[in-house]
Image (tube, rainbow, N blue to C red):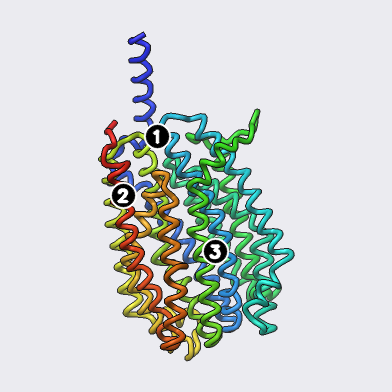
Amino acid sequence: MDEINNVKLETEKEGLQLNKMGIMPVGKLLFTMSLPAMVSMIIQALYNIVDSIFVGHINETALAAVTLIFPIQLLLIAVGVGTGVGLNSLISRRLGEQKYDEANSAASHGILLAFVNWIFFAIFGIFFSEVFIKAFSDSPQIIDYAIDYCKVVTIFSLFIFIELNIEKILQATGNMISPMISNMVGAITNIILDPILIFGLLGAPKLGVLGAAIATVIGQFVSMVIGLMLLFLIKNEVHVSYKNFKISWGTISNIYSVGLPAIIMQAIASVMIGGLNIILISFSEAAVAVLGAYFRLQSFIFMPVFGLMQGTMPILGYNFGARNKERLIHAYKLALITSLIIMFIGVIVFQLFPASLLNLFNASSDMIEIGVRALRIISTCFIFAAFGIITATLFQATGHGLLSLIVSLLRQLILILPLSYALSYFYGLDYVWLGFPLAEIFSTITIAIFLKHIYNKEIKNLDSV
């Protein structure tokens, strides 16, 4: 009997060593895991900003219209990414625990959940787009632009939901190259199609804002097709199969125990931007356009950090599941230092070149006047955000998505909207933007308290494998 147990133990150790997340030097592992995701996210940021640059060259009203739809896009992404985060966390933890059947089951559930998420947004796009837009604006041109854009990106959102879940499934196994490839090809497709469909080049019809939406969903479709090929045609550590498949509510519950807080956490950004749009539209369309330009510009800084987060999460989740404290802490510290460096570069760029950044969007004199001050004020929060993003990743990877949710509620709802509204009411438009750094400072204090709690309760006494 002892001999059998020893063989079983050796087999488990051998299985653990087959996964690079358990044996590769942490610095090299973090680099190889994060770099593809960071490149992918930078390209994602590029096509987001290129899309808005082309829309901005239609006119400022078009940019304002797309900005009003931005909360819906954020909500869509929140549901997709949040579900993916839950998948990533569960799969990586089960792999670390050597529970391969449960990891496969989670991956199979992930594809089905993409269809469920799509149904809700397709219904919204068909029946509620116009109602949503008219709640923010009575400008006929803004309404027409925004309805066209909203219907396309929601009705055809199945492509991005499937693509996001495939991306997270593959990343949970340590495969960062395949998701990068699918993202890159989709992004490049979008970038190429944007000017063709918006301005009617190469014999294509001139579709304006509608063309931007169509280019976006075609890019997402291409990414989805490539992702499906990579998932089903290439050997992976987890397998998606529906032979003898049965829905497990326990698996779904485990996915959304982390995924739901992540969805709510990201959806809060949708509520935040919607609230800020209401505040800013009372001043001018230019102020709304500035907010839209800011969120596109800051994606160049935040997207690499989100890519770093994607590379870090499976490392943290795997080593937490394997009870390897040293590797867990090492990965967290390296990720934090890297994110701080990226954000510091972002602060420098936003402080020195705000007017040049805004001119990418064919900014009017009003946009420049409002936006220069806005970009300089908001960018002061980047350093605090770096700590929040990487620490929230640690919370999610260890199964504590609720703590990340609480911090996001503070940053993007409980604090920022009341602060921005009060500052605009008493001091005017120039002070709206102070709500960003003030909210980040207070949330940083809170997340530090939560980090200490998690460390003392669950990380401090982990046994090394």
Q: Earlier in the sequence, mark 3 or mark 1?
A: 3
57 relative position to 299: left or right: right
Is 267 or 236 nearer to us in this picture? Answer: 267
Q: Position of residue 177 (x, y in %)?
A: 45, 47
- Nearer the viewer's eye, disc 1 or disc 2? 2
Q: Which mark is residue 74?
A: 3
What residue is shown with label 1? 96
Is 150 or 217 nearer to us in this picture? Answer: 150
What's the distance in space between the residues labelled 3 and 2, CA to CA?
31 Å
List the single residue furthest toward the top.
1
Q: Position of residue 288 (x, y in %)?
A: 53, 80
Is 204 or 93 nearer to us in this picture? Answer: 93
Residue drawn at the location 35% of the way across and 76% of the way down:
350
What's the distance in space between the residues labelled 3 and 1, CA to CA?
32 Å
Q: Which mark is residue 453?
A: 2
| Label 2 environment density (alpha carbons within 10 Å; few <14, some 14–19, many ≥20) | few
Q: In the rendered structure, which amino acid carries the disc numbered 1?
A: Gly
Q: In the rendered structure, which amino acid carries the disc numbered 3?
A: Leu
19 relative position to 276: left or right: left
Circles 3 and 1: CB distance less than 8 Å? no
